[in-house]
Image (tube, rainbow, N blue to C red):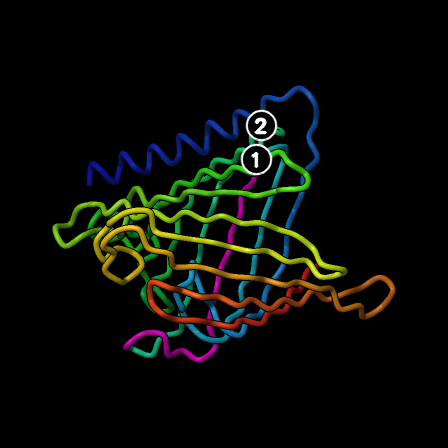
Amino acid sequence: MKDMNRVKVTVIGVIAALAVNFMGVDKVQAQEFKIQGDLVSSYVWRGFYQTGVSFQPTLGFGIGGFALTAWGSTDFDGTSSSEGEAAKEIDLTAAYTFGDSGLTLSVASLWWAGQGSNKYFNFKSHETAHHFEAGLAYTLPLEKFPLSIAWYTMFAGADKNEKGEQNYSSYVELNYPFSIKSVDLNATCGFLPYEAGVGVYGVPNSGFAVTNLALKATKDIKVTDKFAIPIFAQAIWNPRMEDAHLVFGITLKP
């Protein structure tokens, strides 16, 4: 319990420090709100299948380099658990981008216990369903080669091994955005960098393992002169699981 209290104090401290950082600027920064929802044919996370057709809303607020984002996912078939409960995920993320350096630091609470679990506010170390994750991302300052790399590590919460100790499960992802004619594309390579037991990904990880090779294509479908609907398709391969997915999605936003 003391460890979990320290974790909560640490997370709160990081968020507070970031808030003080952006609130202390001399000039008034532009405030931005993000409201959108994605309808996807299936939910695949870091190369691992989660559930079927899902709706995934996003609510975000940004000012300066600081951003707070709430992201969720709820499926439609209600067959994602042995009890037949609908899958439900809520992720809260605080992130700070350091000017034009291309560097972003983030802290997130990932919660996917599902509809009906009713334990969202349980933060006890060995009982909580929250996974607390820290991330560090960097984008190369090259206009013609905007490659980004991100490292994420579960540092507290439900990611435990069989001894009840933190797994510190990590995931590394490289992304390269580019365009061909009027289609926006993004190539992804994601992998587990080291052994971390069964961990959060639900499979034995004996060491380095590539889990997410993907290509995503996005295009706006014009409805009127002032309104268009973005659609996307993503082909995903998971060499570690010898699995593959093809996901289609529609994005709704103001």
> x%, y% of residue 42?
49, 72
| Mark drawn on residue 236 | none
Question: Is residue 70 highlighted in magenta?
Answer: yes
**The residue stretch that appears in magenta:** 67-82
Taking the view exactly as shown, the residue that stands out farthest to the left is 163
Q: Mark 2 — residue?
A: 22
Amino acid type of the residue that numbered disc 2 sits on in the rendered structure: Phe
First in sequence, mark 2 or 1: give its number.
Answer: 2
> x%, y% of residue 171?
37, 49
Q: Please say if 199 is above or below 11.
A: below
Mark 1 residue element = strand
Q: Please say if 205 is above or below 63.
A: below
Q: Residues within 10 Å of mark 1 (few under 14, many from 20)?
A: many
Q: Please say if 121 is above or below 101.
A: below
Residue at 31 percent across and 65 percent down: it is: 117
Mark 2 residue element = helix
Quadrant where the N terminus sits is top left
Q: Please say if 200 is above or below 2.
A: below
Q: Residues within 10 Å of mark 2 (few under 14, many from 20)?
A: some
Residue closer to the observer: 78 or 187? 187
| Mark drawn on residue 66 | 1
Q: Is residue 53 left or right of residue 207?
A: right
Residue at 23 percent across and 60 percent down: it is: 204
Residue at 63 percent across and 66 percent down: it is: 232
CB contact under 8 Å: marks 2 and 1: yes
